[in-house]
Image (cartoon, helix red, strand yellow):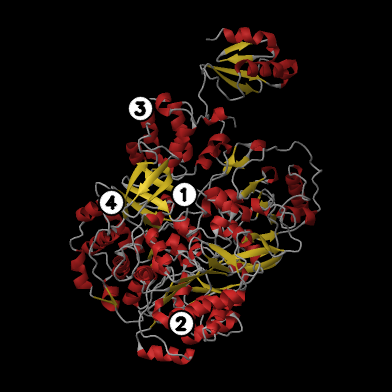
Amino acid sequence: MIDLTIDGRKISVREGSSILDAAKSLGIFIPTLCHHPKLSSFGGCRLCIVEIKGTRNPVSSCTAPASEGMEVTTSSPQIERLRKMVLELILSDHPYDCMLCETAGACELQELAYYYDAKHTTYAGERRKYEKRDNNPFLNRDMEKCIMCGKCVKICDEVQGVGAIDFAYRGFKSKVCPQYEEDLNCEFCGQCVSVCPSGALTGRMWARKGRQRDIREVDTVCPYCGTGCNITLHIKNNEIIRVSSSPDTWNEGLLCVKGRFGYEFVNSPDRLTKPLIREGSAFREASWDEALEYTAARLLDIKNSYGSDAIGGLSSAKCTNEENYIFQKFVRAAIGTNNVDHCARLCHAPTVTALASIFGSGAMTNSIAEIENAEVIFIIGSNTKESHPVVANRMIRAFRKGAKIIVADPRRVPLARFSEIFLQQKPGTDVALLNGIAHIIVKEKLYNSEFIKEQTQGFEEWMKSVDSFNPEYTSSITGVPKEKIISAARTYGSSRKAGIFYAMGITQHTTGYDNVCAVANLALLTGNIGRPSCGINPLRGQNNVQGASDAACLPDVYPGYQSVGSPDVREKFEKKWGTPLSAEKGLTATEMMPAAIQGRLKALYIMGENPVLSGPNTGNTIKALESLDFLIVQDIFLTETAKLAHVVLPGSCFAEKDGTFTNTDRTVQLVRKAVEMPGDARDDLQIISAVSARLGYKLEYEGPEEIFREFREVWPNISGISYKRLNKKRLSWPCTSSNHPGTPFLYKQGFPKGKASFTPTAFAPPAEETDAEYPYILTTGRNLYQYHTGTMTRKSGAIESHAGRAYIELNTADAERLNIIQGETIKVSSRRGSINIEARIVDTISSGVVFVPMHYCEAIANILTLDALDSRSKIPEFKACAVMIDKYNSSPPDLI
Amino acid sequence: MKAKARNADIDISKEFTPEQLKKVDKIIEKFKDRPGALIPVLEEAQMVLEFLPMPILKIIAGGLNLPLSQVYGVVTFYSFFTMTPRGKYTVRVCLGTACYVRGGKAIYDNIKKELNVEEGETTDDRMFTLETVRCIGACGLGPVIFVNDNVHGRLKPAKIKDVLSKYN
């Protein structure tokens, strides 16, 4: 520790602290424009100058380290005069148009000019002139307002890992710009906007929507991915005009393009505002009374004629915990069946089933914040930079701190830029790759014998199962060079602070369950679990997919993963809910579709899901939904699925209600109502309870908080969480008492079910392999801009105008061989169907593999995928099927 | 910057020999894992190639795993680096005080017009590269220009065409 005196006050600070840090900890204000606590120091603005006794000239306190015995003065007539001069120099080259500036009122420069009474005329002279231009729909760059603080440059490079902009030229001509002053072409995360101290960088869609006056700010949680970033909605006249995130949130103010600029859907004119009832091939608007009566009558009718099990419900991982709890309660208690599921079936079903059977719980073991202290980060089957961008920010920070990153993915995903080892395995060969890595760890005795002895079982037997996966064999299956397999094994195997991160690339296979087991085996082998900054970390897709699973929108469990098959558990819930419950496991989402076609399922109630686009084998999904006697869709837009419904009920979006979301690292966070619903749209809770009441089962609650109270009464893991506590602080379950601090990482005290088992996994190829007729492997996924089936992002103007076109990625060599040029429309076919889609020729994908994002209804990727299921978790194989590629107009022209 | 300086359409396989390009790869390989590699790599690459067009900056950025914006920033900061090919002749126009008051600006404007280039650029036929200097110590002869090592003094705008036509 270092002792120094600032303005006559003594303080001890850690070695390496700057004078600015020290002054801040004393609560002394020093003006700065270029300093940011999370970025490297620059010392460029010269405002933070201070005097040090014994030093002739003032020094910039952000770059000067505090040293022993130092006596610092932060404010003196001389210092203040210099600061004012610096400000006036900046202002002399700054447009004086605060009247029109988007940032007025929130501008750091304006604020300092005000305090220092700094004028722009003192040093009036030549001004920099920039052409204003930029084609992107997200950011406005008004570079004449740039004060060259460099925060945007640093955050883009150091934090976001993109480096789209930098200082160019020299002296008076210097400016911040992309290379060759091209248009900005980056990830459009807007991190630069969030740190800009002037009006140089703003959101394009903010323009003239409102500045500081009459704005309400509501803190809530981002509705997109499972990261759960905290956001602040800026509201004017019931409209969200801006989204920001405060630097003191857990995500440190970092957001991605969707979180920051993807909010326009809320106010879209396409929102559903009235209930719709099908009449022939069209819909007509109906009153709520009529729609609810009709819905209830049809459900009762089907229940009476075919029994409760002829009805199913699909809930939504976009909805709150409270809505999901009520939805499954409605299906179980009011309808009387366990046929309830949600989209976790299509993303992390293998995670939930496999990890629960190995460890006793199926969630991310460690928290996102811990990532930055990991030594090794092994990412497999996750395009983290695009699908969980703010998680990737933590990984990049870990990289900056010296962590080694291993990326395994059939595509050279953006995060591979930061990887020490990049393994490009063939789709569907993950078990082989993971076993091959385990083989080396075993062979070279890098494993953690003590951990294996104390906390696991089945090691000896499992070891035999990886015996055959020598590097040569593994390489022959996966296509990964054996040296890379060995070096990945050594890197992961020799670290005791190594985390594995995975997503759909692991789960969406017919071997999804085995893939997850193979991941778990690696963590057990090295003991990388039960401590901070390691673990098995499934990155979950939707904002509340963890919560929807916890709340038991699953066909085999009651809330809190309590088995429907257990008589004791069932009795407990029957008592709690006051009605007899079904003992039969229900149908999964992927089993409901064939059941509908076979006529076993007659009615389906879908809340906030869009299986027409998200389910495998679209043709079959449509056939299934059309086979139903009655389809209810409750949503905020008329989705592709809603178009097939008999009745459509307009629900509410995240900004229109209170509740809680549980993010991917098990953290429960408050969602707060910010705006009113459009037209006659209703709160989803009200809709479900209104239908339930008409079926004779009362679901009466004062509001979401009362539902949460019931939820925590039935599930001890969240019994310590309350709205009151969440108002102050987010809490990660398990949180078992009102003073429990929450659990950032699991299994500190060992596994809930005792010893964890090694699970032998055998390699099996994908359900459909390539052949002469269908020679390409298709893999599907997401891109940075669009989200899932695009229900929200495609209704957000900025995002849609930037990433509104469907495309297929294919390798340069394949394109050459097929004589396909960039941007050409091509025809992609599988045994299920075909789509026409624009070719995007890339070198990030292996020859023989093609990629189509799942977002686009114009070229539905799932028309091509197959509905082969993993036998244990019932997840379909979205990540591998065989396709053929033709030129769009390859059929010979008609020569008549 | 003008499109000319981007040189995005330069076909490096035609502009440079395979040996030259191989040397650049070797330079990148040599410095790759060292901190602060960018400047020495640019320096040596320019020694091999004489100038650094966009495709080369891209190769260097990729090889050193750096953003292209950063490479561009460094190249434009140091006047030593050039992104445009050099002409057979370098025309340096003196804009020092003495030459300036004797009409150096008019000479400069005329040359720009004649060659159809801006400062730092090279004519399409790669004959001339235009630069300006601040005083070359020949004030008595002002206004002056240098063409490679030859001094041309007491110039008038009308004479420019004649002077340049001597070089081919």
Q: Nearer the viewer, residue A163 or A142?
A: A142
Q: What whole-number distance in Å separates the C-alpha atoms at marks 1 and 4?
A: 30 Å
The chain to which mark 1 is attached is A
Residue type, numbered disc 2: Ile
| Residue density around tag 2, few if under 14, some if 14–19, many if 20 or more, within 10 Å | many
Q: Nearer the viewer, residue A566 or A408?
A: A566
Which image quarter: residue A762?
bottom left
Counting from the top left corner in percent of width and height, residue A673 is at: 63, 71
Give the vertical position of A833 relative to A638 (above or below): above
The chain to which mark 4 is attached is A
Q: What whole-number distance in Å separates the C-alpha atoms at marks 2 and 4?
A: 51 Å
Q: Nearer the viewer, residue A45 or A744?
A: A744
Give the vertical position of B114 relative to B54 (above or below): above
- Foreground label between 2 and 1: 2
Whether tag 2 and tag 1 are in contact, CB under 8 A, the answer is no
Q: Which residue is mark 3?
A: B19
Whether tag 2 and tag 4 are in contact, CB under 8 A, the answer is no
Q: Which residue is mark 2?
A: A335
Instruction: Provide the secondary structure element on which disc 4 rests.
Output: loop
Give the vertical position of A65 relative to B22 (above or below): below
- The number of numbered discs placed on residues in the rendered structure image is 4
Q: Do tags 1 and 4 sit on the same chain?
A: yes
The chain to which mark 3 is attached is B
Residue type, numbered disc 4: Val
Q: What whole-number distance in Å separates the C-alpha atoms at marks 2 and 1?
A: 40 Å
Q: Which residue is mark 4?
A: A480
- Foreground label between 4 and 3: 4
Q: Which residue is mark 1?
A: A806
